[in-house]
Amino acid sequence: MAIQVELFLQTLIAGILLGGLYALIGIGMTLIMGVMKIINLAHGELMMVAMYIAYWLFTLLHLDPYLSLFVAMPALFFFGVALQKYLINPVLKVDSILPENQVILTVGIAMVLANLATIFFTSNYRSTPVDYATKAFYLTDFWKNAPIELSLSFSWTLSFLMAVIITIALWFFLTRTDTGKSIRATAQDLDAALLMGVNVGKMRVATFGIGCALVGAAGCLFLPIYYLFPSLGGQFTLIAFVITILGGLGSTVGAIIGGVILGIFESMTATYLGMGWAPVGRFLIFVAALIFLPGGVASLLRKQKFGK
Amino acid sequence: MKKVLPLIVLVCLIILPFIGLSSYLVHIVILVITYSMIGMGWNLLGGYCGQVSFGHAAFFGVGAYTAGILYSKLGLSAWWGILVSVPVVGAFSLVIGFICLRLRGPYFALATLAMGEVLRVTSENLVKFTGGDVGILLRERTWVQKTWYYYIILLLAVGAFLLIKRTIESKFGYYFVSIREDQDAAESLGIDTTFYKTIALCLSGILTGIAGAFYTNYMGYIDPKVVFSLHDISIVTIMVVMVGGVATYWGPAIGAMIMVLLAELIRSNPGLGAAHQTLFGILLIFIIIFLPNGIAGDYRKVLRLFRAKKVSVAR
């Protein structure tokens, strides 16, 4: 019995830690989706780019992956701004039959990024062998006679805490600064924001940059606990999308909750059904959300607010 | 001219095996026709009805596995798969439609992408049923020569072409286009948009599934990574239609010709082989920015481009 409980709690903890990182990926996508009304299918590939930046900084300069956050985030911000300015904006102006052209464009960007990474860095699996990789906290260290034993990996915990800090910083940015408020206004109603004197074009560029920076941060946080290969982007793009559907399209709070739900659910399937099924579990929860809760968690929150 | 052109093309295609092409060239032509059939299926849903799917590998794979499982589990000829895949893929499309057609635009696109990926993972894990990563191998090929395969896929593709032409010229076609142009307006005019979108999805899925069943017979080997491939099936399908021309009858065929030839050229060049995704990606970006409606859709633009060049040369 104790072992069962231990396994369950351990899985739950792993799920929450994973969920915190997933949330960061999801927020980036949901921001872009809210402001620009397009899905960025190169999201996972941008994360891959950030991970390679952090990897090479570690290998060549021995910079800790957590510190390379301060290099990768600005780098990805400017990369995102450039993508938006020179590729996505021109397509918004082109007249075509299919409105989804921008989405297909991001697929093209994703293909180029993933393939270039394969050419330049080979498709080998890489990881950063940090010296604290095996360090962990144990429950028995703090509570001598604990009936069950739980462990908490040092790097997972650190990544999780950094993700929480970045999320809180983003929240302050979005609610307390003028730029943040303008971004939210653009997401809510583009025309009204335009009439109120918000520079919508600039906000679009900024949002794409911030979304890229966020996913870049997630990449740096994932690097010490995961491994890196050029085609890893696709699966994270899907994860980001499932989170945004779960959370409610364009809702930041929803994305956080969705991320945590997905993290817990995924680590549960991995423990109780086997690793290979985790992607299927991801999808099941996605289908369930579509059928039973089409508005995502955000619609539940809204109901709470206006219900009375 | 317009009425005679399809007949001329058809006659040329029928006599094609008699002019003594090498087996490799016939193989390329078969690939071109297979991809144009998948492209026609995608075009019906994506081009005419406006529902861009990123998961046509799902239908392709289900068709291919229907044929494969009939052979490996029931001991029937895999050719039955072409017939059986029609109801199987049809039923499967209804399920996908029920789930994904609740979403619009880009969200639908991503939901179908997820479908394709999930089917790949599922078929990798259901080892007892699908053989897992080992895949299914047909132990004996029906014909050594490729000529019969060529005629079968030609027949299927011509059938698909006529079916799509009939559908688009009937009232269904107008409903599809009205849904693409403005779904809310179509709904307010009394068109049951969900119903017609489901029809488009089923037709499109079935055509793709038949192509998949043919692929099993032709290649003699399938595994989840090949038939449910996101890049080699789903995205190449989109590119076939985007390059050729969205919402045109001939677009998929033109696009398939360009894409297959380009893929073969790139792969046969050792220096470029590794970079074929990059080149495809750049081509996709280029097409979207400069020829958003494809070669068949924007052929006037293409013509003007060539004419402008000639003029400048003359000067």
Image (cartoon, coloured by chain):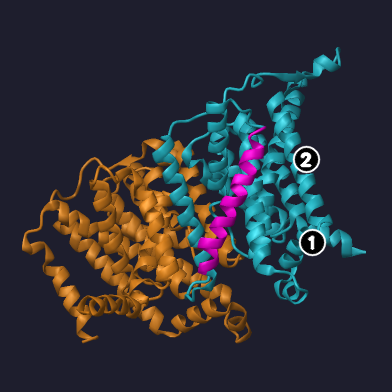
Chain colours: A cyan, B orange
Q: Is residue A154 visible?
A: yes
Residue A177 x %, y %: 81, 57
Instruction: Name the side, left or right, on which A158 lies relative to A142.
Output: left
Residue B172 x %, y %: 46, 81
Q: Is residue A11 visible?
A: no
Write down the quadrant of residue B301 in the picture. Answer: bottom left
Q: Main secondary structure of the magenta part?
A: helix
| Of the pair B82 and B146, the residue shown nearer to us | B146
Q: Secondary structure at mark 1?
A: helix
From what the image shows, is residue A180 above or below residue A127? Answer: below
Magenta extent: A67-91
Furthest toward the top, the residue is: A144
Say what amino acid the circle numbered 1 marks: Lys
From what the image shows, is residue A245 above or below residue A214? Answer: below
**Which residue occupies 56% across, 27% down?**
A61
Instruction: Name the side, left or right, on which B31 lies relative to B132.
Output: left
Q: Secondary structure at mark 2?
A: helix
**Which residue occupies 30% across, 45% down?**
B273
Write down the quadrant of residue B283 in the picture. Answer: bottom left
| Magenta run includes residue B197 | no
Residue at image mark 1: A181
Say what amino acid the circle numbered 2 marks: Ile
Q: Residues within 10 Å of mark 2 (few under 14, many from 20)?
A: few
Residue at image mark 2: A165
* Chain on which label 1 sits: A
> Going from the N terminus, do you reach mark 2 or mark 1 first?
2
